[in-house]
Image (spheres, rainbow, N blue to C red):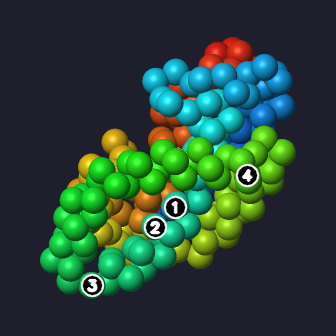
Amino acid sequence: MTHPNADREALTADLERARQDFHRLLAGTREDEWGKRSDGTRWTNEELLFHMVFGYMIVQKLVFLMRVFGRLPTWVGRKYAQALNTATGPFDVINFYGSRVAARVYNRNRMGAKLDRVIASLQRTLQRENAADLARGMHYPDRWDPYFRDYLTLSDVYRYPGRHYDHHRKQLTIASARQS
């Protein structure tokens, strides 16, 4: 088992890696690339970039849910995850259109600052987690995202946005994303 401090350091480093990479992508995106369709999604590059930020925003909520459900009997979290799995269709619609609309608010001029604030918040919270917190887990709706499993620990939750980010980064049709 990984030592909690080593895991915390790796998670912190991964948050920072994505933050720096995201700013490189924002700076390297040409004007004609923002509205270009991404590869494998129905989002434009700008919408997909926001969706990548949203992956970090959602982790703030997942950490809170973990504090609640991670202390409840396992069956409660399992039933909650099963109920959410039944709502996968509506979730997908909200996820798609929500990112499309939100990219108009957190557009290319604002999403970098938003990601900075969210990652700074996650890093502060992560530094306060103890070994028991990082090992605590709960059931998740595993049909909502390819990186959700039936059961995730808090460490897994902190690891999730980097995986989500890397997955979607490959779908960007921005020249600077292909070069690095």
Q: Nearer the viewer, residue 106 or 142?
A: 106
Which mark, residue 72? 3
Give the alpha-carbon distance from disc 4 to disc 3, as whole Å. Answer: 35 Å
Q: Nearer the viewer, mark 4 or mark 3?
A: 4
User: Which amino acid, mark 3?
Assistant: Leu
Q: Residue at x 57, y 48 (%)?
A: 99
Q: Nearer the viewer, mark 2 or mark 4?
A: 4
Q: Residue at x 54, y 52 (%)?
A: 98
Q: Residue at x 65, y 30 (%)?
A: 45
Question: CB atoms at circles 2 and 3 under 8 Å apart?
Answer: no
What residue is pinned by disc 4? 106
Q: Quadrant of residue 100?
A: top right
Q: Quadrant of residue 114?
A: bottom right
What residue is pinned by disc 2? 62
Q: Nearer the viewer, residue 28 or 151?
A: 28
Label 3, residues with CA under 10 Å away: few <14, some 14-19, many ≥20: few
The correct choice, above or below, for 38 with respect to 132 in the image is: above
Give the alpha-carbon distance from disc 2 to disc 3, as whole Å. Answer: 15 Å
User: Which amino acid, mark 2?
Assistant: Leu
Which mark, residue 59? 1
Q: Is residue 177 visible?
A: no
The correct choice, above or below, for 129 with respect to 96 in the image is: below
Q: Quadrant of the N terminus?
A: bottom left
User: Which amino acid, mark 4?
Assistant: Tyr
The correct choice, above or below, for 66 with respect to 59 in the image is: below
Q: Position of residue 41 (x, y in %)?
A: 48, 29
Question: Count of labels shown?
Answer: 4
Q: Residue at x 46, y 24 (%)?
A: 40
Q: Position of residue 69 (x, y in %)?
A: 33, 79
